[in-house]
Image (spheres, rainbow, N blue to C red):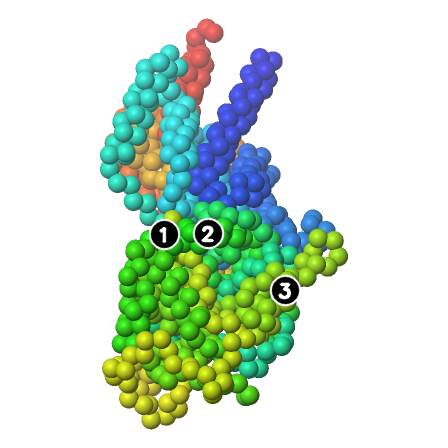
Amino acid sequence: MTRGELPHGVHHAHRQWARNLISLTLVTVMMLLALANLIDVYGDPIAWAAAGVPATLIGALIACAGTVPALRLWWQLVFLAVSQFILGPVIALNGTTTAHVMPSLDTLSKGWADTFGSFKYLISITPPIGTADGSLMAVWTMGLWLTFLAGIFAVQGNAWLSLAGVPPLVAAMALSALLGTGTGWQRPLCGTAFALLLIIWLSWRLELFEWGRWLSSLIIVALAIGLAAGGTTLTSQPRLVLRDRYNPPLSPYDYTSPLSGMRSYIKDHKKDVLLTATNLPAGTPVRLAVMDRFDGSVWNLSDSSEAAGSSNYERVGTSIATEEQGYPFTATFTVNKGLADSWLPLAGMATGVRFTSSGENTFYYNADTDSAIIPSDTREGMTYTESGIIPVKPTDKRINQAKASRVSQPEAREVPDSVSKLATSIAGGQASGGAAATALADTLRESGWFSHGLQGDYPSEAGHGNYRVNKLLAGTAMVGDSEQYASAMALMARELGLPSRVVMGFLPKNQEGDITDARTKKTTGNTTVTEFTGNDVTAWVEIKLQGLGWVAFYPTPKETKIPDENQNLTPPNPQTLVRQPPVPLTDPLRDKTQAKGQSSLAGADADADSANLFWARFQRVAGTVALYGSPLWALLILCGLILLIKALALARARRHGSPQTRVAAGWNAISSLAEQSGITAKGTRRDQAESIARQLGTGGQALTQLGREADYASFSGKAVLSSQAAAYWRSVDRLRKTMLASLPALRRLKTRLSLKSVVILSSRRADRSKRQRTATRARTPKKGTKS
């Protein structure tokens, strides 16, 4: 080495580091632009950045570590495993760590499960999903692994290998779009910036970028952006979102009618405290369930499969999107003994629900009815905090002036004639929807009488189906409780063309049954407590009015308005011409309490399926474990990419260039395989052949022969036929297989996955070596000449 070579080598190393640093920086920026599609999925840019930015930077650093020979491949895999299964869970599941720094056993186990389960969580939860259930592991996994895969190609000395870094970047953009939402103004900006950076980076790496034409390039880019933006505004832009294709495994038709079990709360827990609400605004009702489907027997829940105006119960995270305006609040609910059902008590319009125990946070929310279902059922001791909005209560004047909204609802079936006749006689002449609804509620409340029908009460049958409603409106006595009056008013409103639904929940009532603020007690400081008993479980009606939304009406008479046998209990305008339904053979005074069955299987079909139930369950569990229970898929993808790169390099060396160049590249393939297996082979081709044969412990005749043929092709000056180059490569392939077979199994695997000296297979490298040897031979004086 001469003196002048040292500064040149240092300068080249500095240029290489600068080029790698620029490439990794651009890869990191492009990855963050791709992952930005998930910001509104989480609903919190800070939470997204807390996971996405560190994961992307760590992935780039691990890729950069590959430029140091001692840290290649195996150490990189160790760094990736530590980052994925230790650092990632500490950030995404920080609440389970010790002192918010050290990972606990729960942190590691949940981190392992959420590495794969978080992607399913993203498409099964309605955005914004928040940061519960390790949802941040999805953006952490994408940022870490895809940045690493793009980065290892971005720092390769061969510029054309940078093209292999494009698929991970494009995959990040596509995957983020599939997991994202169908709205958001930032997506076009991020996509445009991503495309520009990708084009500029590749042009620079492939030395196709001409700085002298920056003005014309800028004009072309501006025109392209203008044409693309203008074209997209003229056409529809449907976005494929996996969340829209995913059907949550919950159907409201599988649940018993909530209203059918209302009287049991009053009978068994009339004075028992079932629910305690802390810091709930005074006088605020608490919902249990909202029902808009009447099948003649019961009121029950529906979804969009039965009516376009109905919403679905969708699994939500810690945050719930809403556009409603009103008074914000934050209240904590504690479930007490006796309240064990599938309906989660909530107040107002929820914007977020957080459970004290992390194992109790799976529930489904209906954004239209502001009600929730918890499949695991409420139980004693369950505590959760709700953030929400209490809508502004409209004045009576605004209600009376409001018209009815147009909403598609499930058709009410088997409605008795008494409902239509009485509704028309009470409010048929009202000019507006709000006034008609008010007239119905006032008439029922003033004309009716109250009784739960329990022991010691005036006789009042349970149920709210067509038989019981007809008896209430057309019988000899209008006596009942909120179950009957709410059902009757909702059906009467439907007959008048008013969108109606029945709500069951807790009301902070006084002795007369009216809502009162006095039920809310102040404790220490500004804390308030409201205790709801079984007697507070009530049903009421909501009517949707234009400009006001769903407005609550309470048609039940005062609870102190108790009838006796000496009073006239006849309903107003009794309908004597109504045809009575036939009396059921069993329990004629009770309605059916179970929702209508949805199964279409006959008994024989069910028996046939049950025989294979065990194997079907076993296959499902085994498939789930195979898909989500192992990180081998990531390692297999990485190994597959390495093998693909090496195969492409060999194929290019085999076919690219002149026959002399291809022969030289064939010997390079042998020497590179030797270096990848850990063999040190330097000097001339003869020296390399002897060194490889000695260290492998195999015969060197084939190696020496191939070395001589490569020397002949390089230095003889005679033409080499293409068929000779092809035959030479066939010999090279046989020799490479022999070399691999002579290695131990573990060393052979390491050799196959090693990327060391892959660049030596480049034809330009072979041509450059040939030119250098030719020039050296030309400078060497021939025998008998003067130097």
Q: Residue at x 64, y 69 (%)?
A: 381
Q: Nearer the viewer, residue 358 or 608?
A: 358
Instruction: First in sequence, mark 2 or 3: give its number.
Output: 2
Measured along the vertical axis of the image, is residue 762 above or below residue 274? above
Q: Nearer the viewer, residue 448 or 775?
A: 448
Image-quadrant location for residue 655: top left
**Residue that badge 2 annotates:** 394
Q: Which of marks 1 and 3 is in front?
A: 1
Task: Kindly indicate whether the residue at mark 3 contacts the one at mark 1 (C-beta within 8 angstroms).
Answer: no
In the shown orientation, is residue 300 left or right of residue 105? left
Q: Please, what is the three-letter code of the amino acid marked with disc 2?
A: Pro
Q: Which residue is drawn at 46% across and 66% down?
A: 554
Q: Can residue 330 be seen in this view?
A: yes
Q: Please, what is the three-letter code of the amino acid marked with disc 3?
A: Arg
Q: Residues within 10 Å of mark 3 (few under 14, many from 20)?
A: some
Instruction: First in sequence, mark 2 or 1: give its number.
Output: 2
Task: Kindly indicate whether the residue at mark 1 contacts the one at mark 2 (C-beta within 8 angstroms).
Answer: yes
Q: Residue at x 41, y 79 (%)?
A: 478
Q: Find residue 402 and name its label.
A: 1
